C-alpha cells in the first residue's frame, strides 16, 4: 500500500488529511511524486493523492478552498471528490455521484519540531525542482501550470508553509479547560469588501453584529474584535476593530476559556476553518445559518445554537446561554461528539471510503 500525494498540494490546507493518512497507513507509506499527476493542472488550496494497492489505484481529490464550485477536470480524474464546502443544491448528488461532503478542516501541524517543517517542505519541493531543472520535462509541463508559482521559491514556501508553521498540532484541539461563565473571546478577520464579494454586507456585518451584542451586555467581559484588512471596511466597522492580534497558541487558549464562540459563513459564504476548530475544541457554538452542506446536519440545541442575523437576536441568545450553563455544557459536549464522529481526519477519510 502506497499513498502518493501530488507535491503541488497546498500543505497549509491539506496537512489535516496528511495527519489522517499517516495515522491510517503509516508515515513510511506516504510519498510525494509528481509523475501520477503530470497531466493535471496546478493546484490552488486543494489536494490530490493516489492510493496504490498493488495494481489497483484510487484517485482522490480534496476540494479545500472557499468555493462550492466543482472543478470539472479534477472531478473527471478522481474516483472520489471530497469537498469541505459541498453544495448539493447547485451540484445534485444524482448528477455528481462522486461528490462527497466532508466536515470543514483546518491547518494543523504535522509533528511539532522545526526540523519536521523543513523535512516536509523538502519532500514536497524536490519533485517540483526536478521538473524545473529538467528542460525537457519542463517544456512539457510549462503549459499546464503557472510557472512563477514553482520558480519563485519565496512564494512557494510562503504560500504553503508560512501559514502552516504557525499552526498547532491536532493534539492541541481538546476541551481540557472549563469555559468561563462570563467571558467571551472572539477575534477574527475583517475581510476586504468589493462589489463582487460584498463582504461588508455579509460576513463582516454578521461578525460586527455579534461583537456589538457582546459589548452591549452589562457585566460581560468581552475580548477581541476584527482585525482590519482594508481602509474602507475599517471606517465602516471602526467600533469593532481589534487593537491587536494574538499568537495562534494564545488564540486557542482564549477560545477554550470563552463561554461561547461565534460562527458564520465566511468569504464566499464558505464554512471556514473556524467551524471545524470550534467543533474540535468542543465549544458552545452560536452560528448564523450555514450556506453549504455538511455530511450530516448540525442540530440546533444538540451540537450548535442557530441564531438570526440581527444584533438583538444575538444579544438575547448570548444572555440566555450565559444564564443556562447546563445548556451551554450540552452544546459543548455535542460539538465535540459531532467532530469525533464525522470531522476528525480519519473520520473524513472514512466518509470518502478510505480506511
Image (cartoon, rainbow, N blue to C red):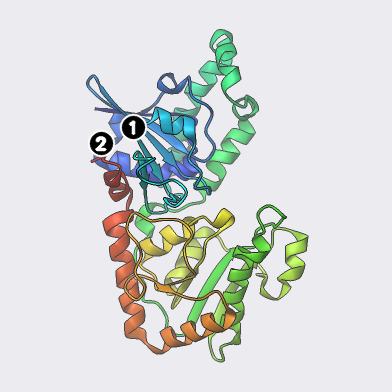
Q: Is residue 334 above or below residue 221?
A: above
Under circle 2, the secondary element is helix
Residue 115 screen position, x and y as percent: 45, 38
Task: State the residue lying farthest toward the bottom.
Answer: 218
Query: What residue appears at the point 50 percent right and 78 percent down from the top-left corner?
Result: 184
Can residue 227 be seen here? The reply is no
Under circle 1, the secondary element is loop
Q: Residues within 10 Å of mark 1 (few under 14, many from 20)?
A: some
Give the quadrant of residue 145. Answer: top right
> Which quadrant: the N terminus?
top left
Can residue 330 be seen here? The reply is yes
Query: What residue appears at the point 62 percent right and 72 percent down from the top-left corner?
Result: 208
Q: How far separated are the C-alphas under marks 1 and 2? A: 19 Å
Q: Which mark is residue 79?
A: 1
Q: Are marks 1 and 2 in contact (CB under 8 Å)?
A: no
Query: What residue appears at the point 60 percent right and 64 percent down from the top-left corner?
Result: 203
Query: What residue appears at the point 50 percent right and 38 percent down from the top-left corner?
Result: 10
The residue beneath circle 2 is 25
Q: Residues within 10 Å of mark 2 (few under 14, many from 20)?
A: some
Q: Is residue 189 above or below residue 328?
A: above
Give the quadrant of residue 36. Answer: top left
Q: Nearer the viewer, mark 1 or mark 2?
A: 1
> Which quadrant: the C terminus?
top left
Amino acid at each position: 500500500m502506497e499513498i502518493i500525494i501530488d507535491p503541488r498540494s497546498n500543505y497549509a490546507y491539506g496537512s489535516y488529511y496528511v495527519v489522517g493518512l499517516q495515522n491510517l497507513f503509516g508515515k513510511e507509506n506516504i510519498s510525494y511524486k509528481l509523475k501520477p499527476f503530470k497531466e493535471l493542472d496546478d493546484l490552488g488550496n486543494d489536494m490530490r493523492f493516489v492510493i496504490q494497492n498493488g495494481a489497483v489505484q484510487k484517485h482522490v481529490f480534496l476540494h479545500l478552498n472557499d468555493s462550492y464550485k466543482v472543478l470539472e477536470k479534477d472531478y473527471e480524474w478522481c474516483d472520489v471528490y471530497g469537498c469541505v464546502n459541498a453544495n448539493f443544491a447547485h451540484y445534485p448528488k444524482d448528477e455528481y455521484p462522486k461528490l462527497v461532503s466532508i466536515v470543514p478542516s483546518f491547518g494543523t501541524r504535522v509533528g511539532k519540531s522545526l526540523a519536521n517543517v523543513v523535512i516536509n517542505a523538502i519532500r514536497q519541493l524536490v519533485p517540483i525542482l526536478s521538473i524545473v531543472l529538467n528542460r525537457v520535462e519542463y517544456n512539457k509541463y510549462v503549459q499546464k501550470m503557472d510557472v512563477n508559482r514553482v520558480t519563485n521559491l519565496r512564494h512557494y514556501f510562503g504560500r504553503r508553509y508560512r501559514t502552516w508553521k504557525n499552526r498547532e498540532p491536532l493534539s492541541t484541539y481538546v476541551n481540557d479547560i472549563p469555559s468561563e461563565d462570563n467571558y467571551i473571546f472572539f477575534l477574527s478577520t475583517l475581510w476586504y469588501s468589493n462589489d463582487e464579494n460584498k463582504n461588508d454586507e455579509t460576513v463582516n456585518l454578521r461578525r460586527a453584529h455579534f461583537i456589538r451584542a457582546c459589548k452591549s451586555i452589562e457585566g460581560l467581559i468581552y475580548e477581541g474584535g476584527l482585525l482590519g484588512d482594508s481602509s474602507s471596511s475599517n471606517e465602516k466597522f471602526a467600533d469593532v476593530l481589534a487593537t491587536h492580534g494574538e499568537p495562534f497558541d494564545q488564540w486557542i487558549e482564549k477560545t477554550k476559556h470563552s463561554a461561547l464562540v461565534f460562527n458564520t459563513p465566511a468569504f464566499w459564504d464558505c464554512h471556514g476553518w473556524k467551524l471545524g476548530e470550534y467543533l474540535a475544541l468542543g465549544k458552545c457554538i452560536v452560528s448564523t445559518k450555514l450556506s453549504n452542506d455538511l455530511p450530516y446536519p448540525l442540530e440546533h440545541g444538540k451540537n450548535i445554537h442557530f441564531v438570526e442575523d440581527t444584533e438583538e437576536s444575538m444579544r438575547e441568545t448570548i444572555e440566555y446561554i450565559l444564564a443556562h450553563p447546563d445548556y451551554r455544557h450540552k452544546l459543548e459536549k455535542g460539538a465535540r461528539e459531532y467532530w469525533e464522529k464525522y470531522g476528525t481526519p480519519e473520520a473524513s477519510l472514512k466518509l470518502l471510503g478510505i480506511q
